[in-house]
Image (spheres, grey):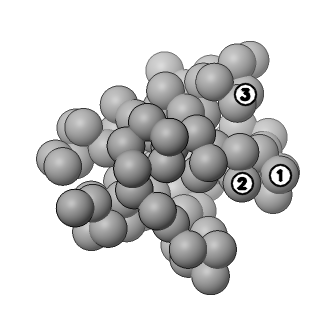
Amino acid sequence: MTDDDARRAILASIGAVAPDAEIGQLADDDDLLDTLDLDSMDVLNIVTDLHRRTGVDIPERDYGKLDTLGTFIAHVVSLAP
């Protein structure tokens, strides 16, 4: 999986879980929770949707590594088959 593939899948999952989020304005270093006003349940739903879309399984212990779009992308790419 490329960075662009991961970015598209993550943004699609965020859009599915938080349709009012302004993902078009999201920079790689923006804090996802603060910028998009997400909570921990939103993160869980995003990770679940992302798994459905890509098959990438992100362990719960790694959720703290998903704080920015850039780190989220890098982590998904590192876990992709």
Amino acid under disc 1:
Met
Q: Which residue is mark 2?
A: 44
Q: Residue furthest left?
A: 2
Residue 41 picture location, percent across and down: 83, 52
Q: Where's residue 6, x and y in %?
A: 31, 44
Q: Nearer the viewer, residue 58 or 22?
A: 58
Q: Which tag, 2 or 3, sits closer to the chain's start? A: 3
Residue 44: tell me if it is visible: yes
Q: Nearer the viewer, residue 26 or 80?
A: 80
Q: Are marks 2 and 3 in contact (CB under 8 Å)?
A: no
Which residue is drawn at the image coordinates 70% and 30% (left, top)? 17
Type of amino acid at the residue the image marks with label 3? Ala
x and y, in percent, of residue 45 in the image: 71, 45
* Disc 2, SS: helix
Using the numbered discs, state the Cα–Cα distance from disc 2 to disc 1 in whole angstroms.
5 Å
In-image side of 45 versus 29 (left or right): right
- Would you place residue 80 above or below residue 69 in this image? below
Separation of disc 3 and disc 1 at Cα? 11 Å
Q: Is residue 13 above or below residue 43?
A: above
Say which residue appears at 27% left-offset and 68% top-offset.
Answer: 78
Q: Are marks 3 and 1 in contact (CB under 8 Å)?
A: no
**Callout 2 touching callout 1 (CB < 8 Å):** yes
| Residue type for callout 2 | Leu
Task: Tell whether 35 sits left or right of 51.
Answer: right
Q: Which mark is residue 18?
A: 3
Instruction: Work out whether mark 3 precedes mark 1 in sequence or the reverse, and give the earlier one.
Output: 3
Quadrant of res 7: top left
Q: Which residue is mark 1?
A: 41
Distance between the alpha carbons at the discs numbered 2 and 3? 12 Å
